[in-house]
Image (cartoon, rainbow, N blue to C red):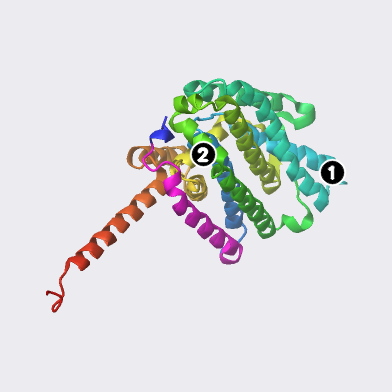
Amino acid sequence: MINPSKSRDRVQPGDSLSLVMIVLLAVVAAGIPVILPGDFWIHVANEILLLGLFGMSFNLIYGYMGQISFGHAAYFGLGAYGTALSMRFFSVDGDIGYVGFFLSLLAAVPVAAIAAAVVGVLCVRLTGIYFAVLSMAFGELLYFVVFSSYSVTGGDNGMQGLLPPLALRDPRAYFYMSLAIVLAALVVMWLIVHSPFGYTLRAMRDNPRRTRFLGINMRLQMWINFVIAAAFAGMAGGLWGPLIRSISPSLLGWQHSGVGVIITLIGGAPFFAGPMLGAIIYTVLHAVVTSLTQYWPLTIGTVVLLIVLFSPDGVMGWLGALRERFARRRKREAGADEAVVRPGEVN
């Protein structure tokens, strides 16, 4: 398991690079529905947004707090079911109005947050591998509850026919709605990680003993962050159901939690925008590979292996290293130019 506290760049030094990356991605994303032909790649771009938000919510726990959760997908799935059940409540003859739809999307956040508030009370009592295993255990428990509740959730059949309002059934319209919500969520997340609370999380990650000595209630801070991360994951899950038009209990399983881990490792846990870049690479690669061959697990396993061995800080870490190397080269060249004595300058 990679320890983000021992990462070379950590989180702060990559803030400028992350900000540039987020702005660039937002500009490019705004033009995607016009540039890309057909609905398939619009759908893929929408998945990128939601998986990127899911990965960034996971990174609040991993990259900033220094703990790893193998059950984070439970809150993504609970958010999806919270929205789906609310849509069923607000639907009339299979159709749902805009007010009912957006209220259903909002329902995902408190559903995920309340579940995390209960689970987090026990999880934050432990750290390291014990935190990881306990979070996975609770995630599987929530998965079993959803799986076995046939009368409410449909059990292993899941819930089908999650249609948004008519205008949002167009992939481009739904994409722009998702883009607006995800960008708003990223702004809020940016403010959180650059607030005193965010710096407290970094202190807990880097030096828990000193943080505890300063009188900070570490369990309370970890619990708050756990709930916040779950709320963002629930938001991503709430948008996922109407996009796919159906949900299933597998969204809560440890395999889906693994997607968040992989996305974060590929993009770079020490960077704010790392999981979003990881989501782009993961989702596009999945779409291309699965259309050509059945060896997707082999492909993604190889990618993760290469990242861990050759770029532990992910693709963002590699880009940051290139930027530093270029900056050092320009500095050396500037120094060499200043050292050259021009004719007539010698006294």
What span is colored magenta in the figure? 7-35
As for residue 23 lying within the magenta part, the answer is yes
Q: Quick one: SS at disc 2? A: helix
Image: 275 above or below 28: above
What is the residue that sits farthest to the front in this orientation?
Answer: 347
Q: Which residue in the protein does label 2 denote? A: 199
Residue 174: % across, % down: 68, 55
Residue 23 shown left or right of residue 140 in the figure: left
The residue that appears at 84% across and 45% down in the rendered structure is 91
Asked if one can make out residue 313 in the rendered structure from this viewpoint, the answer is yes
As for residue 105 lying within the magenta part, the answer is no
What is the residue that sits farthest to the right in this orientation?
Answer: 92
Residue 10: % across, % down: 42, 41
Label annotation for residue 325: none
Q: Give the CA distance from mark 2 to mark 1.
A: 41 Å
Residue 101: % across, % down: 78, 48
Q: For residue 81, which quarter of the picture?
A: top right
Q: Given the image, on which type of amino acid does mark 1 rest?
A: Phe
The N terminus is located in which quarter? top left
Asked if one can make out residue 259 in the rendered structure from this viewpoint, the answer is no
> How many discs appear?
2
Residue 11: % across, % down: 45, 43
Front residue (pair 279, 185): 185
Residue 333 shown left or right of residue 133 in the figure: left
Front residue (pair 92, 211): 211
Q: Given the image, on which type of amino acid does mark 2 rest?
A: Tyr
Front residue (pair 310, 7): 7
For mark 2, does the 10 Å Cα neighbourhood hold few (<14), some (14 to 19), or many (20 or more) residues?
some
| Mark closer to the chain start, 2 or 1 | 1
Q: Which residue in the protein does label 1 denote? A: 90
The residue that appears at 56% across and 21% down in the rendered structure is 134
Residue 157 shown left or right of residue 61 in the figure: right
